[in-house]
Image (cartoon, rainbow, N blue to C red):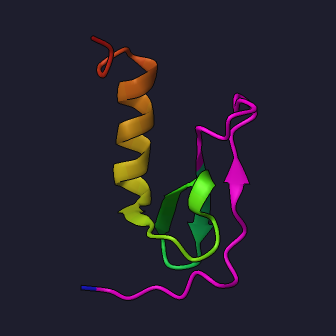
Amino acid sequence: MNTYDLSGAKWRKSSYSNAKGECVEVAFLDDDAVAVRDSKDSRGGPALIFTKAEWSAFLRGAADGEFTA
């Protein structure tokens, strides 16, 4: 299991974020990894780490409607 120091990560919030802060932030890390966290817990809260391939697969699935009810 890898440990990541996210203190210098450059987080990006979606342009679709709402005023309630119900959104996620994404940071692209140096070693081919992508970190995702809840924007409401941006001061050291937990983050999920994915490979770039996993993140790309998720984005393709979301664009294709794979996760809609």
Residue at 49%, 62% (x, y): give it.
34
| Camera-side residue of 35 and 40 | 40
Residue 60 at x, y percent in the picture: 41, 30
In the image, the segment drawn in magenta is 2-24
* The C terminus - image quarter: top left
* The N terminus - image quarter: bottom left
Residue 38 at x, y percent in the picture: 53, 53
Q: Name the quadrant containing residue 49.
A: bottom left
Residue at 64%, 73% (x, y): give it.
43
The majority secondary structure of the magenta stretch comes to loop
Q: Is residue 26 magenta?
A: no
Residue at 39%, 16% (x, y): give it.
64
Q: Name the quadrant containing residue 11.
A: bottom right
User: Residue farthest to the front?
Assistant: 20
Residue 55 at x, y percent in the picture: 42, 49
User: Residue farthest to the top?
Assistant: 69
